[in-house]
Amino acid sequence: VQLQAFGGGLVQAGGSLRLSCAVSGRTFSRLNLGWFRQAPGKEREFVAGINWRGITISYADSVKGRFTISRDNAKNTVALQMVSLKVEDTAVYYCAIDLTVRDAVPVSGAYYDYWGQGTEVTVSS
C-alpha cells in the first residue's frame, strides 16, 4: 500500500491550498480516508475524514467551514481543500486509510492502518 501526499507549501494567512493524496495497493472505493496534522511540539490531530461511501464526512471543529475533504474513486485520490488559512493551521499534514469497511469516520489515528509521508503547510502572518 502506498499513499503519496502532495500540495503543501507556504501561504499567507487568509490564503488557500489544496492537498491531494494518491492511494495505491488497495481497493480505493472500500476505504475510509482521513487527513491528520501535526504541528511542531504538538500531538497529531484529526482534521477531516470521509467514509468509503462518501456520505459520512467529519471535520475537526477548528477547520469546519474552512476545509473540505473529497474523494475521487476514479483517480484513487483524496483531497483537502483549505481556505481562509490561519497561522495555527501550520503543520505537517498526513493522509491515512482505514481498511475496515464501516460507515462511521474514525477520528482517532489508531483506527487508520496506513499513512502517507506528510506534506508541510506553513501559513505566515
Image (cartoon, helix red, strand yellow):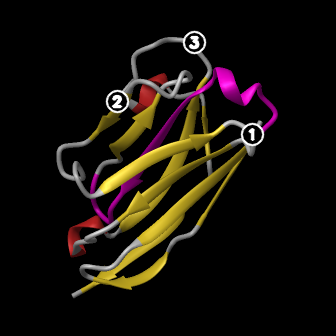
Q: Nearer the viewer, mark 3 or mark 2?
A: 3
Query: Magenta includes 26?
Result: yes
First-in-chain label (1 vs 3): 1
Judged from the image, the secondary structure of the residue bearing numbered disc 3 is loop
Q: Is residue 106 left or right of residue 113?
A: left
Label 3, label 2: how far apart the Cα atoms are: 15 Å
Q: Residues within 10 Å of mark 1 (few under 14, many from 20)?
A: few
Label 1, label 2: how far apart the Cα atoms are: 25 Å
**Quadrant in which residue 10 is drawn:** bottom left
Between residues 102 and 44, which one lies in front from this camera angle?
A: 102
Residue shown at 32%/33% (left/top)?
58
Q: Is residue 27 left or right of residue 113?
A: right
Residue 107, numbered label? 2
Label 1, label 3: how far apart the Cα atoms are: 19 Å
Type of residue at label 3? Val
Q: Residue furthest left?
A: 61
Residue shown at 52%/28% (left/top)?
112
**Quadrant in which residue 31 is drawn:** top right
Q: Is residue 37 left or right of residue 87?
A: right
Judged from the image, the secondary structure of the residue bearing numbered disc 2 is loop
Q: Which residues are magenta?
A: 24-42
User: Given contact means CB atoms under 8 Å apart, are the residues at marks 1 and 3 in contact?
Assistant: no
Type of residue at label 1? Ala
What residue would you read off at disc 1?
Answer: 74
Judged from the image, the secondary structure of the residue bearing numbered disc 1 is loop
Q: Nearer the viewer, mark 1 or mark 2?
A: 1
Query: Magenta includes 92?
Result: no
Residue 9: x and y in percent read 49, 78
